[in-house]
Amino acid sequence: MWRPVTQVRQRVQDALAVSEDGAYMELMAAHEFVLKASTAVLIGLLDAPDAKLAHSLEWTCVRDNGLHRWQQVLAEVTSGAVQKAEYKHYEDTHRLLNARDSALTTVYTEKVASGDWRHDVAERLDLLRRELSVEMAGPGAKPSLRYWFDNLHTLRNWTRGHGLPSVHQRIAAVEPLMEVFDLLVTKLPQFAWPLIYVMPTLGGRAVARPLSDHEPPRHLRLKDLDEGVYVLNDDELAPVRLLTTDRSMDKFFLPNGQYQEATSPQGVKTTYQALCYSADIKTRHEATRWRGERPVLTDSVTAGRRALVGDNNLPPTPPNYVARGALEADLVDTLLNDRDHVVTLMGRGGIGKTTLALHVLHNRLDENAFANRIWLSARNVDLEDDQRYNRPKPVRRQVASIEEVAFEFCCLVQDAEVSREDAPRIMQEYVSDRQSLAPLLVVFDNFETVDDPLALYKWIADSFRVPNKALITTRVEDFRGDLKIDVRGMERQEFFQLVDETARRRHISDRIDDAQIEELYRETGGHPYVAQVILAEAERTGNKIRRPRTLMATKDEILGALFGAIYDSLDSDAQRVFLVAAQYGSVIPKWQFEALLLRPGNELRVDVIGALETLCAASLLEVIRVGDESLKDREEFLYTPMAASAFAERVWRRGTLDFDVRDAIEEDLRAAEIFRPKLTLEQVTNGFGFAFDRFVRTLSGDVVERGGITANESAMLDYVCDHFPAGWAAAAQIYEQLEDSGKAISSLKGYLASYPDAWATWKELARLQRRVGATAVAGRTLLQGALSSSVARDRRARLLEVLGDWFTLVERSVYEPMQARNTARQCVEALNLGTVEYSGSEDALVVRLLVIAQRRDDARKHLRSALLRHPSNTSLQALRAALFD
């Protein structure tokens, strides 16, 4: 454990020994220390000391007099543009957290279920929220660790004057605060890394001194390192510039705000207040490094203008746009209707949501449709740094919160100055006006990258009223609005036009033909951004067009920008399900995939249904639906888009998965061999029956060869048949081959539950029942099958076919008299006597049935009538002797 952590913990323990009430404030301070120290390490994992973003984040922290900006910096590092892609040798920007370090951010962002230590942290905060009456949202079913850090400043401020907790409340809060502190300092990975102080000796050589339980390795390269604190992560030293100490290494300081720039004859002296949390010592530290204006990232190319030009602040029309007729028409119709006040364009990253919206707003909407068209962008990464499509480029978000949205809006539409506090109320007044003769359209681009998308979405849904409209573009289906328009891959003709025009602009038309464009369309699913990347690569290298999957597998930065933040926000179940689907590498029927992961031998069970819903909503998986759109239960197939599949391969390669999770995924893939041969996209149109037949042929061959079926195979077969009842007949054949009559019988029953008219199957079921000695049951089965026919003529014919055998069983007293009577009466009703003429032998069966039903008068009446038609029938003559003599 780090020495500064040990010191802070000891201070808390000393306070506890004196008074629990006094320990409360020490614990609040200890949690401030954890937030600041862990954030300082994350910033240190960014690239060089003068990296623009790291410098900007440090600049923010040294000026924060509280915790709110520290929390914002932590949020930015763990879920924003900082998190993905490796920017190597790219001047005037920064390398984002690399593949190894980005796994650390998952600790903060992963949504976890009960049983995980991070869920325990969220539960403790929920307890504190209720115990101290703090106004904050609850954690939900699957919170992330960010729930603690995002709300720590609220908890701190509420209990430092705002909430005024009583002594009793403070004492009650000590235990959960202590439990959370211990969890954080023992479970957060960075606190387990060696902490080192690098300092020069008198001879000028740099040496490393341990600040934790670990001795630094002797092979460390210390040359050219500045004096200061570092963490050692996989043999790499990362500077922790915001955590400072001196050469005595007995006190450790973190920024505590109070930034000052004082002018003197010697020049400008820049300092900030530094606080030692283990000794409550405050001092002034030099801040020359962070002097001046905050370094900022550039605006996105699709950020809204800072002032209205005419009636709007729209970014420029996207260059080289290829029309997407059907989507454009849908969007125009939706924006102009008088029903839907929140409209969502939903689709994968780079699929064209933003360009579609901009084209429609510039060129397809009547200029008088809205008084103002306001564009607010939360985009933190532009997917191309220029027209070379070489790598994504981090950019500054235009808006990130409700307050920023409202303030930006008011600055655009109002002449008078507005305070940030009043802006939300004023914007609500504008967008909730139902009687407005000058309706407003407000676009929220890249919605999922605001600080709290759920809170902002609720605010929008509660505030906007038609004729005013909100248009959201997002990769996440959580924000569906009143109407959701799915933006998927381009139509074939649109894609061909895009590739043809782009190839001519890049002067590579001679290197691509229609067959290659067709292959590109098939492999990318018509994804315009992926196509642009591939064509730009061909121009840059002078080579032929490479296969999309092969090329995208080399584009770590692009894959990270497209999918990284969303993947890291998934809970562990969804991450595993995604990796299994992607590594499977083919289309798979949804029921088969669910059966695979729900098999009894799966030791690490997952919430498959919930995970699939999450992944499809996040566009990491797609569902292909087959069949008539009017049908409620259409057949569904799962498909991993090519770029998402390449991203999954990147996750798999980087080796950051826990060993037990990797082992479980590999076991899933071995179990999936039962579904070979794999389907192609083209074969999906054949429907699930085609896929099921292939599966059954493979399974049947395997089990016959080895002479048995495993519990996993049996469970997967049963699960699939539960959702595809036609498969039960094939399952029964497999079980009968294995001489498992019990499973064969239950399989046939499963089939008949959905297909009761299948008379041959009823007879097959009765045959199996007789084989196992259930003769009486077999007799009832045949009657039940006959009665189940939906056609009266077939029902009569089937009953007459099996009544003779049933009579034999009745005569042998196989059934109780009352049971036989009730069954006979049911059969009489089904025969609908008096509407059909029977043959002599059939009439004899009817008479016997009436006798068993204890309707002797009706039996005699029917017999008289039958003898008139068939006087010489010996069966009828015998019955007359029994009934009349």
Image (tube, helix red, strand yellow):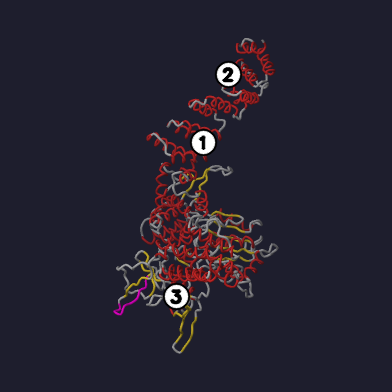
Q: Residue 865, how many percent across, how many down?
A: 68, 15
Is residue 802 among the parts visible in the rendering? yes
The part of the chain drawn in magenta is 196-204
Residue position for label 1: 726
Q: Is residue 34 left or right of residue 630?
A: left
Label 2 crowd (10 A; few <14 / some 14-19 / many >=20): few
Tag 2: residue type? Glu
Report if the CB atoms under discs 2 and 1 are less than 8 Å apart: no
| Rendered image: mark on residue 811 | 2
Residue position for label 3: 253
Q: Earlier in the sequence, mark 2 or mark 1?
A: 1
Q: Is residue 201 magenta?
A: yes
In depth, the one of 476 and 768 nearer the eye is 768
- Quadrant location of the N terminus in the rendered image: bottom left
Q: State whether residue 772 is above or below residue 256.
A: above
Asked which quadrant contains residue 103, the reply is bottom left
Give the secondary structure at mark 3: loop
At 51% across and 74% down in the image, what residue appears?
Answer: 64
Tag 3: residue type? Phe
Cα distance, mark 1 to mark 3? 70 Å
Tag 1: residue type? Ala
Is residue 349 among the parts visible in the rendering? no
Cα distance, mark 2 to mark 1? 37 Å
Label 3 crowd (10 A; few <14 / some 14-19 / many >=20): many
